[in-house]
Image: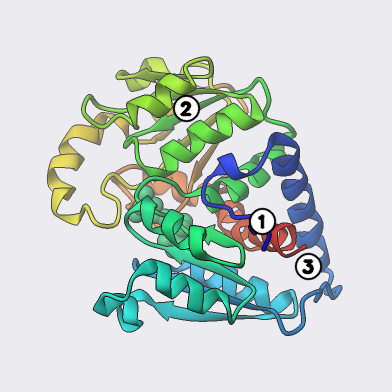
Amino acid sequence: MAQPRHFLTLDDINADEFRSIIARATELKRLQREGISHARYPGKVLAMIFAKASTRTRVSFEAGMTQLGGSAMFLSAADTQLGRGEPVEDTARVISSMVDAVMIRTFEHSTVERFARMSSVPVINGLTNDFHPCQLLADMQTWFEHRGDIAGRRVCWLGDGNNMCQSYINAARLLDFELVIACPEGYEPDADLVAKNAERVRIEHDADAAVEGVDLLVTDVWASMGQEEEQKIREAAMAPFQLSRGLLARAAKDALYLHCLPAHRGEEITAELMDAPDSVIWDEAENRLHAQKALLEFLLG
Ligand code: CP
Ligand code: NVA
């Protein structure tokens, strides 16, 4: 049996595929808004396994699959036999024998890799501790819709060198933009990943210097899911990296800013920027729907 195509990190697609998924996402957005049916997959089922909370990922995949003519099934990891210790590999063989694609949100990145190895259908990473590639499809769609191609542009990641940050590193390599990661010492992304992408990525510990002249600023919560007990210590370390009007003023004149949400207003981003009339954060959230429908089409064929 041929191995199915998976989407565990952005490394699973090439630059042309990335750009064509974005273009198709924009087209699907138009079809959806104009009420033109694009239900190509009647009877197809997406299983969604969640070991962590979600609003956007769950709603966008479920609504998206329905709009594509199929259906999505929500599985709380704890309520399946996974929660009682059934091996990931056995679960993968069984679930993939019954559905057409599987989305997983979990802790260890190795869990989605193990699942994918035994899955007979495409597996999508809906967020792990290390990567959040679906969010990058939506983020890049948002940039492309407002500003055109991102090649050669300068992007600043602010705050924690987390799963989102690491997916930005992958995106920088694929789409050929420069990425400055502004984070406190001790909160850098994976050193090997940075070293492998040294041509396009650099770390900076001074937020003011990092944002100078950049075209796009991006931030995320300071304590990710699973790090709740570190909230206070992280707040203290990351306070100088708050995305604020003052920081934005140092960026390029027409700079955009993004946040994958959920946001902690007054921590990593000011409430004023969240609610600013020119904020594209809400487009970014909506684009999860369109981008993942394009991804589903790409994987389901
Ligand atoms: N941005 C994102 O993945 O949101 P959820 O956690 O709500 O799915
Ligand atoms: N870095 C955050 C992203 C949430 C969508 C987390 O992992 O909790």
Amino acid type of the residue tagged 2 in the rendering: Cys
How far apart are the alpha carbons under marks 1 and 2?
A: 22 Å
Q: What's the residue type where badge 3 is placed?
A: Arg
Mark toward the start of the polypeptide (3 vs 2): 3
Residue 263 visible in the displayed image: no
Q: Is residue 272 left or right of residue 146?
A: left
Q: Which callout, 3 or 1, points to the residue nearer the camera? A: 1
Q: Helix, strand, or loop for circle 1? A: helix
Contact between labelled residues 2 and 3, with CB atoms less than 8 Å apart: no
Camera-side mark, 1 or 2: 1
Residue 33, numbered label: 3
Residue shown at 42% from the left, 28% from the top: 193
Q: Residues within 10 Å of mark 1 (few under 14, many from 20)?
A: many
Q: Which mark is residue 156?
A: 2
Dot 2: element: strand
Does 265 sit above or below residue 205? below
Quarter location, residue 20: top right
Picture coordinates of residue 27, whole percent (x, y): 81, 56
Instruction: Quickly name the residue at label 1.
Output: 291
Residues at marks 3 and 1, CA–CA distance in whole angstroms? 14 Å
Q: Residue furthest front?
A: 1
Relative image position of residue 34 (x, y in whole percent) = 84, 69
Query: Which corner quadrant holds the N terminus?
Result: bottom right
Q: 188 or 111: which is nearer to us? A: 111
Q: Quadrant of the C terminus?
A: bottom right
Kind of residue indicated by mark 1: Ala
Compared to residue 162, the image places residue 33 above or below, namely: below
